[in-house]
Amino acid sequence: MEKSSGLFMFLMLLMLMIKVSFSDEESFTPDESRLWFDGDGESELEKGELSYEMDSVLMRGSERVARIPVNVDSFGAVGDGVADDTQAFRDAWETACSLKNAVFLVPERRHYKVNATKFRGPCQKNLIVQVSGTIVAPDEPKDWDLEHPRMWLFFSKLKGVKFQGGGIIDGSGSKWWAASCKITTTNPCKGAPTALTIDSSSAIRVKGLTVQSAQQMHFTISRSDAVRISGVRILSPEDSPNTDGIHITESSNVAIQNCHIGTGDDCVSIVNASSNIKMKNIECGPGHGISIGSLGKDNSTAIVTGVVLDTATLTGTENGLRIKTWQGGSGYVKSVRFENVKMNDVKNPIIIDQFYCDSPKSCKNQTSAVKISQVIYRNISGTSRTPKAMKFACSDSVPCSNIVLNNINLETENGTAETFCNCAMGFDYGIVQPKADCLKSSSCGGVEEDNQAQTHDPIHTEL
Ligand SMILES: *[C@@H]1O[C@H](CO)[C@@H](O)[C@H](O)[C@H]1NC(C)=O
Ligand SMILES: *[C@@H]1O[C@H](CO)[C@@H](O)[C@H](O)[C@H]1NC(C)=O
Ligand SMILES: *[C@@H]1O[C@H](CO)[C@@H](O)[C@H](O)[C@H]1NC(C)=O
Ligand SMILES: *[C@@H]1O[C@H](CO)[C@@H](O)[C@H](O)[C@H]1NC(C)=O
Ligand SMILES: *[C@@H]1O[C@H](CO)[C@@H](O)[C@H](O)[C@H]1NC(C)=O
Ligand SMILES: *[C@@H]1O[C@H](CO)[C@@H](O)[C@H](O)[C@H]1NC(C)=O
């Protein structure tokens, strides 16, 4: 009796802690917080979307602001998918950025070929980037700008900018994929560009765009605060290497809502120095799932706190909800909640892997690790492609703690799902299937550092 009320108190405390870590939504501009999806967010969102459209250039006679269209065509863009429209885009950007209430306009039904470009701010107030047509990257890696090996469309130092329109950002990635280190071992291979990056920016909205066939990652948010992404589609084939959908690094207060992501790598990946990341209504597949990590590579320190995923469907993915860290790292992952998730034929529906080793060589066991605690999984159901539907492979010297499971129903086709624990501590309540008693019994104490190479266990390696 006493024991269970203690458990209850602990649980309440845990919930409170996770809630508290999200209470600083005020850091959004008033406009942003209005559109934030807590409380009765849905109806708020509807209203919000409406006034947002009013702002757009497509609404004739907007009463609110007189918009100044800055059309790339007026700067000599051809839009036939063949001509080099890079200079026209750069010139149009300079103009749009220098004007208040400007709309940088990429017209519909055209294809603009644009080289790697930095679209730099700061810009004048109320800039809209309206992508209605298609922007394509040159498809030949050999001709890529040596000065910008890792970026294609790179936006930085922006504040209060809206990206919108039903257009497409197409990285023409297939030749890059064929040359990837994951595919070829003959060429000297290097990393490839990220298709779209928003860097060092704040109060940004991205709505309705499609990003496809990225050379490597599709869409990175780096060193930014208050970014809201909604209705974005990300599409690449299942076998395209390292094509993460949305990658968040060193950023806070990021919301991703109503997005459909199908790629050859993580649908969403959240890495170092990120906090208050919310995802709602996400469809993921194909891909490697929703990931926190990888973290701690090359003995680095990483901190990720306050991540919530609410309502998602994962279909045919390698992983479902994953936290992955390299051995030898430090720092922590704390306050994470995954809830209301449906798995359809997912290989590893719930997985914590502190032995992550995405390298051709095997990784040594080390004593240092990125600490993982306060992770709640609630209302997760569906089918697992492998019997170990839940895997908590935690470090022997830095065990996972406060792992909480509530209302889990994961099964394999023949109904033999099970839970694996190594040094994972926590508890479950409600209906939890497969049983997760190992969370209560898997105590663990500082195993000696081991300099031998680790055996190549498939859960530790990503292909
Ligand atoms: C775009 O890249 C192509 C191929 O490398 C190059 O020939 C062209 O000059 C570049 N355009 C600009 C404006 O730099
Ligand atoms: C992690 O983020 C911090 C804070 O932004 C930064 O100083 C550090 O270099 C980052 N570490 C890695 C490995 O990227
Ligand atoms: C990480 O630390 C371990 C143990 O101190 C050391 O053996 C290893 O060489 C380090 N790795 C890197 C990439 O610095
Ligand atoms: C559980 O999650 C599913 C989505 O997988 C959702 O449809 C359902 O409403 C959730 N149940 C509760 C009680 O929130
Ligand atoms: C159940 O299915 C899993 C995966 O589909 C398979 O690996 C396992 O061997 C099966 N077990 C039995 C008892 O048939
Ligand atoms: C590394 O640690 C893991 C987890 O304790 C263990 O399963 C594995 O056998 C270890 N590897 C070696 C080479 O000792």
Image (cartoon, grey):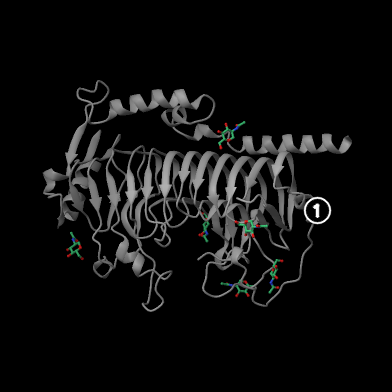
User: How many numbered discs sit on the rendered protein?
Assistant: 1
Percent x, y of residue 15: 68, 36
Quadrant in which the N terminus appears: top right
The answer to which quarter of the image holds residue 364 is bottom right
Percent x, y of residue 162: 33, 37
- Residue bearing mark 1: 441
Residue at screen point 44% across, 46% down: 224
Quarter, ligand 6: bottom right
Q: Is residue 26 above or below residue 450?
A: above
Q: Name the residue at the top extreme.
A: 63
Q: Relative to the observer, which residue lies in front, 262 or 37?
A: 262
The answer to which quarter of the image holds residue 454 is bottom right
**Left/right of residue 67 with respect to residue 450 in the rendered view:** left
**Left/right of residue 354 with respect to residue 3 in the rendered view:** left
Q: Relative to the observer, which residue lies in front, 369 or 43?
A: 43
Residue kind at label 1, given as amino acid type: Ser
CA neighbours of label 1 inside 10 A, class few (<14), some (14 to 19), many (20+): some
Residue at screen point 45% across, 57% down: 265
Q: Is residue 437 above or below residue 148?
A: above
Q: Relative to the observer, which residue lies in front, 123 or 14?
A: 14
